[in-house]
Image (cartoon, grey):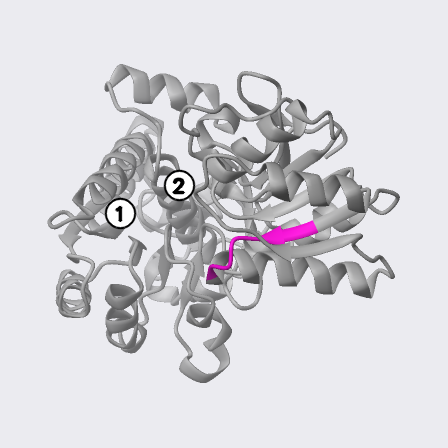
Amino acid sequence: MPQAKCLAHIPEFACCTKAEQPLGLGGNWCLRDVAGLEEHFGRMRSRATISAALAWLLLAGAANAQTLTIGVAAPLSGPSAILGKQVEAGAGLAAEANGVELKTVDDACTADGGAAAARDFVAAKVNIVVGFLCTDAIEAAMPILKDANIPVITVGVRTESLTDRRAKTGWPVYRLGPRGDDERNAVASSLTRLWQNELFAIIDDGTIYGREMAETFRAAAEQAALKPVFVDTFRPQLDNQIGLIGRLKKAGATHVFAGGDGDDIAIMGRDAAQLQAGIVFAGGENLRTPPGEVPYAMGTLMIAPPEWADVADPKVLESFAAQKIVPDGYTLPAYAAIEIAKAASALSSGTPLTEVLTGHDFTTAIGPIRFDAKGDLSQSPYRVFRFDGTRFVPLEGN
């Protein structure tokens, strides 16, 4: 920090070392010599006068202190407004709890909206931006924010290229949430480990989503020298899957990964029970949505991130309840993003925020967060859950 900001015109004050605690109130000041301070103010005899002079100096620093200003970009209009309101609510509650100011702008989930929001943030001289749920909006905003040295913590964009192209674009973007490929990679790594001694099958519904999930798992299994006993594509949205279950049973499969919708997996579980096939089914986070008339079979596995409200700090949840804010969707990630922004700012001490955000552990309402060199989460949020007849609960040992 420049010496002028450490009251260098008063020698008794100096910039704090890393081991010292600043006096605060907007400066990196440490009092070096009370006796020297007396001499500076004309050999004052009264300790009360000395205290008053010191208080005046600190109040002067407070007047010059800058409040951290955080930009919040969210779709507050259009079809995604309900999600944008979640970001706005979570960020607003965190700002109140952490004493920061917000500049909230509607990015409309469009390229034009994202670019306009970025220009507003630059004009407002925000220190950092959080939010952004849509790829079009953030990709239009990032060149503008990069030129202004304003980093971004996105709470919803999963597009892999956003961070994969970091070396080329130089965009200072950090992802507080899963990447687009995190789900299928988590399915592959989790089930390859859990089913290494099982007779398993891999099926999918023929959609891009289903095929990518199934193929990633199949490739991981092959790398681990594991071979499925059955691989096939099933026809989705049928009233029953008796024929498929018959083929799985004949192949000897006891565990089946199905790349498809929750409704289809629920029907498979029901039909397997009727045929006494003894099959455990597993799927991705599509199972998070409750099925239709057919419930999931007991023991069905789901690979997905946790519900944030299930792992959040109870005190933060109390603050949500006090404000009658439901802690679902993007509310808690937005809250955590504000916490990270404030913590990074406090750690910066003149260091660019992009350097502080990379490789530091941040304590948040949804647990510890750390970003890797590309700006992605250093640890995948995906876990294995088991349906207990009522809800999905964490699988023991995971």
Find the distance from the CA under tag 1 to the CA under tag 2. Answer: 34 Å
Amino acid type at mark 1 = Gly
Residue 383 showing in the rendered view: no
Residue at 45% from the left image edge and 42% from the top image edge: 35
The residue that disc 1 covers is 61
Residue toward you, 305 or 61 = 305
Residue at 18% from the left image edge and 62% from the top image edge: 121
Residue 166 showing in the rendered view: yes
Q: Position of residue 308 (x, y in %)?
A: 46, 32
Helix or strand or loop: what does disc 1 sit on?
Answer: helix
Residue at 31% from the left image edge and 38% from the top image edge: 54
Helix or strand or loop: what does disc 2 sit on?
Answer: helix
| 340 relative to 186 in the view: left or right | left
Mark 1 neighbour density, 10 Å: few (under 14) some (14–19) many (20 or more): many
Q: Viewer-nearest of labels 1 and 2?
A: 2
Residue 132 within the segment the image draws in magenta: no
| 247 relative to 382 in the view: left or right | right
Q: Is residue 262 above or below residue 143?
A: above
Q: Position of residue 57 (x, y in %)?
A: 27, 44
The C terminus - image quarter: top right
Residue toward you, 299 or 50 = 299
Q: Which mark is residue 333?
A: 2
Amino acid type at mark 2 = Pro
Magenta segment range? 202-207
Q: Which mark is residue 158?
A: none
Q: Quadrant of residue 172?
A: bottom left
Most distant residue in the bottom direction = 168
The N terminus - image quarter: bottom left
